[in-house]
Image (tube, rainbow, N blue to C red):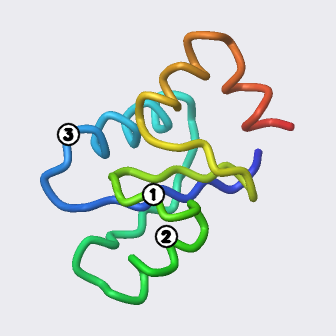
Amino acid sequence: MKDVVVYTKPMCPFCVRALMLLQKKGVKATEISAAYDKEKREEMLAKSNGKTTYPQIFIGETHVGGYDDLAALERDGKLDPMLNG
C-alpha cells in the first residue's frame, strides 16, 4: 500500500471525513497539521500547486486534492487501485 499524507487544520470537518474514510479503508495516513506551522503550510502549498484549502491529500507522489476528490475516487471505484498500485 502506498504512503498517504493528509495536510489538515484543527476543527476541519472535511479533514475528519478524509481521515475517517482512509481509516475505514485500512490506511494509516500520516497527518500533518499545517494551518499554524509556516514551514508545513509552505510545503503543502508547494506540493499542491498553491492549493490553500484543507485537507490536501497525497497518495504516494500523486496529489489527490481535498475530501470531495477523495470521496469521488472512492465512489468511482478508483481509490483502492490508487492506494494499492
Mark 2, residues whose alpha carbon is within 10 Å: few (<14), some, or many (≥20)? Answer: many
Q: Which mark is residue 13?
A: 3
Q: What residue type is labelled 3?
A: Pro
Mark 2 or 1, which is nearer the eye?
Answer: 1
Task: Describe the element under mark 2 as helix, strand or loop.
Answer: helix
Quarter holding the N terminus?
Answer: top right
Mark 3 or 1, which is nearer the eye?
Answer: 1
Answer with the quarter of the image where residue 26 lies: top right
Mark 2 or 3, which is nearer the eye?
Answer: 2
> Going 49% across and 70% down the picture, which residue do you hit?
44
Task: Describe the element under mark 1 as helix, strand or loop.
Answer: loop
Are discs 2 and 1 less than 8 Å apart at CB? yes
Q: Residue furthest left?
A: 11
Q: Which mark is residue 44?
A: 2
Tell me: residue 49, above or below residue 57: below
State the separation of the CA atoms marked 2 and 1. Answer: 8 Å
Say whether disc 2 or disc 3 marks the residue closer to the N-terminus.
3
State the separation of the CA atoms marked 2 and 3. Answer: 19 Å
Say whether disc 2 or disc 1 marks the residue closer to the N-terminus.
2
Tell me: residue 67, above or below residue 28: above
Quarter holding the C terminus?
Answer: top right
Mark 1, residues whose alpha carbon is within 10 Å: few (<14), some, or many (≥20)? Answer: some
Q: Which mark is residue 51?
A: 1
Q: What residue type is labelled 1?
A: Lys
Task: Describe the element under mark 3 as helix, strand or loop.
Answer: helix
Q: What residue type is labelled 2?
A: Met
x, y (%) of residue 31?
43, 62
Residue in the foreground of this view, choosing between 35 and 85: 35
